[in-house]
Amino acid sequence: MNKETPKTPNIDDQLAGQYVLGTLTVEKRSAFEQRLANSPELQKEVNQWQAHFLSITDRLEPVAAPQPLSARIERSLDELEQPPKPITQASTNPIASFWQNLVLWRGISMACFVLAMVLGIKLHTAAPVLSEPTYIAVLVQPENKTPGWVIQTSHSNQMQLVPLGAVEIPAGKALQFWTKAEGWDAPVSLGLVKKGETLKVDINKLPPLTENQLFELTLEQETGSPTGKPTGPITSIGRGISM
Amino acid sequence: MSSSTGFDYEGVLHQCAQGDRHALRQLYEQEASRLLTVVLRILKNRPLSEDVVHDAFIKIWKNANSYHQELGSARGWVYTLTRNLALNALKHTNRQVLAEPDFLLDLCDNQVLASAEESNEMQALAEDHLAQASLQTCLEYLEPERKLCVLHAYVDGYTQDEIAKLIDKPLGTVKSWIKRSLNALKECLK
């Protein structure tokens, strides 16, 4: 490979090593980064040093990476995949205003609800209901993986969120139940959890449950997340499986 | 998760470049804990470190297509990207370098001790890269004080100024120790 600078490989080795150690001055670092951007050879040198030095930090006692961090990364990826929609221009952007039209969505969700009720009643009267769980998820606390909730669908059209122990909800707060399947743009709220109650969700209102679908509970304001997306810390999280 | 043996870092980056999220998830399972360990060591601030690891995975996802075989170690690439974010984050935080002499001494002892100790365990940890094991061997040839400078820089992310103050040596001495140590390591690793 031809090099665009007359610097000797020795000096480049030296610089690459210092770059990896992080000991270059601000000026030298940014000068080196500019050269780095255009030189695969230098990048290779850097990655090589890094791979060598990694063997030192590989020996540090590992810290567990929390599951919510992975959920957060997934959310950020979701946002990346969505076409850019500048929030500041929401009022003038027809697509954004469509999504933010509360009246419209209330109308649609009401219509869905009514439809679901009608279909549900029809189903109940037409066919016997299976009571075997068909789909299940265990939600655990992110910090210590203690199971806190179980989700199961034992009826063909209803999902239950059952607490496994006493539920502590701080005053003025509520737990909001969310789900997100692969390929969805954002998590969908399944409702707010009230103390000591089993939350029942009509799954006819949802797209079909999928393997590995993510379920989580986040701590939100009493009235639920103001943005319609999870904003508070995740208290429990898990993925669903078909039985 | 204890060993990185056999994990196809290169393959995973290629899949990420093609928009395969499962690949990024695999990388997370494989490496997130170690990355967090490295970043936390530098920043000494858990929430900030989690932010950095989050940003690192997003950046890995976005930049995966700029990685190709010619660039050498894919794992090195991942760590270079992540450590750079951590070092940048350092500018916006008041990390305390001072006032932990015992901790630092322990750290040094541990490092010196661990490096001098059993090479078996060390090999087990780095068995996927023969070259990595040899860095440990090469470090042995450095004088303890110089080795410490290198370790403080790499493991703790301390600046040369900070290191000079820590070990109570002139900045110039630290600078030349680090330079010479790198040259010696490079020579030894050949």
Image (tube, coloured by chain):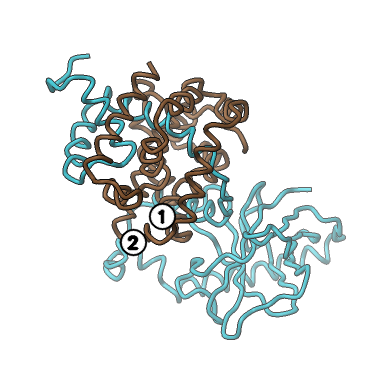
Q: Residues within 10 Å of mark 1 (few under 14, many from 20)?
A: many
Which chain's colour is cyan? A
Q: Residues within 10 Å of mark 2 (few under 14, many from 20)?
A: few
For the residue pair A103 and A212, the one nearer the viewer reads as: A212
In the rendered image, the quadrant that contains the C terminus of chain B is: top left
Q: Position of residue B101 (x, y in %)?
A: 44, 56
Q: Quadrant of residue A18?
A: top left
Colour that chain B carries in the picture:
brown
Q: Which residue is mark 2?
A: B93
Q: Is residue B140 above or below residue B81?
A: above
- Tell me which chain the residue with mark 2 is part of: B
Q: Residue at x 55, y 62 (%)?
A: A188
- Secondary structure of the residue carrying tag 2 is loop
Q: Position of residue A29 (x, y in %)?
A: 22, 41
Q: CA distance from mark 1 to mark 2?
A: 8 Å
In the rendered image, the quadrant that contains the N terminus of chain B is: top right
For the residue pair B147 and B79, the one nearer the viewer reads as: B147
Q: Residue at x 42, y 25 (%)?
A: B141
Callout 1 and callout 2 share a chain: yes
Q: Position of residue A189 (x, y in %)?
A: 57, 67
- Tell me which chain the residue with mark 1 is part of: B
User: Label 1 is placed on what type of residue?
Assistant: Leu
Q: Which residue is mark 1?
A: B43
Looking at the image, residue A155 sits to the left or right of residue B110; the answer is right
Q: Is residue B66 above or below residue B48?
A: above
| Residues tagged 1 and 2 counted as in contact (Cβ below 8 A) | yes
Residue at the bottom extreme of this rendering: A171
User: Label 2 is placed on what type of residue?
Assistant: Thr
Looking at the image, residue B124 sits to the left or right of residue B176; the answer is right
For the residue pair B105 and A168, the one nearer the viewer reads as: B105
